[in-house]
Structures are given as C-alpha cells and as structure tokens.
Amino acid sequence: MVPGFVQLGILAVLFQVTIIAGFYSYLRWRYPIPDAELRPRTKWLLLSGLALVTFGQLAAFGASGSLRVASVFSMRQAIRIQNAGFLVTFLGYGILVAGFALYPRKSD
C-alpha cells in the first residue's frame, strides 16, 4: 500500500492531465488550426509536454513514497530522483506553454 500523499499526488496529476486535455479539446473545438503543417507539430509539442509533466511528477512522488513502503533507495537517492522528477516536470510545463503559444499561430 502506498502512502496517502502519493495517492493524493496521483490524483493531482490525473486532475492536471484532465484540465490540460480539456483546455486543448476546447481550443481544438472552438479554434481549429487551419494550417495542416502546424497541426501535427502543435499536437506533438502538447503531448510530449504532457507526458513529461506526468512522468516527472509520478517519479517524484514515487521516489519519496518508496521510502515508506520498501527502502529501495537511500534517502539521498530518493531526494535526487525527486529533484530530477521536478525538473522534468518544469521542462514539461515549458513545452506545454510553448505548444499552447504555438497553437493560434499561422505560418505565412
């Protein structure tokens, strides 16, 4: 059984993914991208950013949660994995922002 903060973190990650996917669906429905070349690039940026956000947060929560269940990592290793997970998360959010900024642009 994983600790409660890990379960709460997983729910927070799922909530974030749902909000981001809902916002993208709304943009796609309300403002479709007219340029066929820009559509796959924007979708790739958004999906890769979302994957990095999800992976980073789950790795960060899992590393600290593993200390309470079974000590697979030492405390120092768990903190390093947690910090790396947060860095991956911030990188993913940066890619998401770039994807949403690129969304309404039209290539000339």
Image: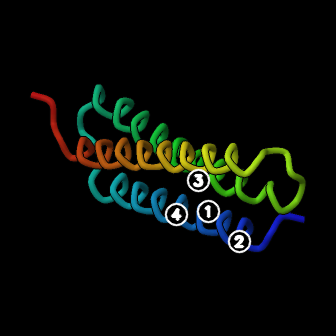
- First of labels 2, 1 by sequence position: 2
SS of the residue at dot 3?
Answer: helix
Q: Position of residue 106 (x, y in %)?
A: 16, 37
Which residue carries the number 3 mark? 57
Q: Disc 3 vs disc 4: which is toward the camera? A: 3
Which residue carries the number 1 mark? 14
Which residue carries the number 2 mark? 5
Q: Disc 2 vs disc 4: which is toward the camera? A: 2
Q: In this figure, what is the number of numbered marks?
A: 4
> Residue at coordinates 65% horizontally, 52% vertically from top-left?
58
Which of 53/76 is in front?
Answer: 76
SS of the residue at dot 1?
Answer: helix
Q: Position of residue 7 (x, y in %)?
A: 74, 68
- Tag 4 and tag 1, C-beta contact below 8 Å: yes
Left or right of residue 48: residue 39: left
Quarter containing the N terminus: bottom right
**Disc 2 and disc 1: Cα gap in Å?**
14 Å
Which of 18/93 is in front?
Answer: 93
Which residue carries the number 4 mark? 16
Which of 19/49 is in front?
Answer: 49
Q: Disc 2 vs disc 1: which is toward the camera? A: 2
Under mark 2, the amino acid is Phe
